[in-house]
């Protein structure tokens, strides 16, 4: 196995392990991993990492490159969507002189919104996900001069 393939393999394995690690801490009571947050999306991330591992074992460099970039894109998209969900979920009630409206504007419950947003935090698992994705992509970007080193 070539050194870049080994780096990509390690990145894919880290991605698989990171999907089971705590990503979010909810109200200081429980921790959520990727599957607790969104099961179908977590399974897609897992399948992309498994296909990437199969590509490294079968020495399919184009497949490994595609899966590495796809996994990093999925991780970035997961982080963005999770962040948007957390910081836009609580401020939707707005009471005006015309009655109760559902709005994304300023809420009179601003202190409650802020309290609820402060109770949900990202945990160390999100960093492990990013490290795995970056390693998987880094293995595909290493030049051919370095990749002549083989591990038997």
Image (tube, rainbow, N blue to C red):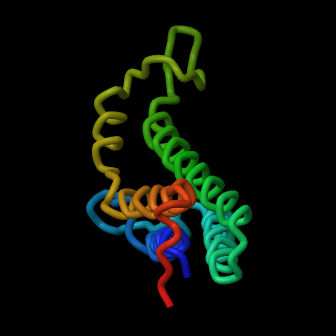
Residue at 66% from the left image edge and 66% from the top image edge: 64
* Residue at the bottom extreme of this rendering: 152
Give the vertical position of 123 relative to 152 (above or below). above
Q: Quadrant of the N terminus?
A: bottom right
Name the one closer to the observer, 150 or 24: 150
Q: Left of 79 or right of it: where is 124? A: left
Q: Position of residue 109 (x, y in %)?
A: 37, 28
Q: Residue 56's image quarter?
A: bottom right
Give the vertical position of 95 relative to 32 (above or below). above
Q: Position of residue 144 (x, y in %)?
A: 56, 60
Name the one closer to the observer, 117 or 101: 117
**What is the number of callouts on the image?**
0
Q: Position of residue 140 (x, y in %)?
A: 57, 59
Q: Left of 18 or right of it: where is 74? A: right
Residue at 36% from the left image edge and 57% from the top image edge: 127
Name the one closer to the observer, 105 or 69: 69
Residue at 45% from the left image edge and 64% from the top image edge: 132
Q: Position of residue 119 (x, y in %)?
A: 29, 49
Residue at 60% from the left image edge and 66% from the top image edge: 42
């Amino acid at each position: 196995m070539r050194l870049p393939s080994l780096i990509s393999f390690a990145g894919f394995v880290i991605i698989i392990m990171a999907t089971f690690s705590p990503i979010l801490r909810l109200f200081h009571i429980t921790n959520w991993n990727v599957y607790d947050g969104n099961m179908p999306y977590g399974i897609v991330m897992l399948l992309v990492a498994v296909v990437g591992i199969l590509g490294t074992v079968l020495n399919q460099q184009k497949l490994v490159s595609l899966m590495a970039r796809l996994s990093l894109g999925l991780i970035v998209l997961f982080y963005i969507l999770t962040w948007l969900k957390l910081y836009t979920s609580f401020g939707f009630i707005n009471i005006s002189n015309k009655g109760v409206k559902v709005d994304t504007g300023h809420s009179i419950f601003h202190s409650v919104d802020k309290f609820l947003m402060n109770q949900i935090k990202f945990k160390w698992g999100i960093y492990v996900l990013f490290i795995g994705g970056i390693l998987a992509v880094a293995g595909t970007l290493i030049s051919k001069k370095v990749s002549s080193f083989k591990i038997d």
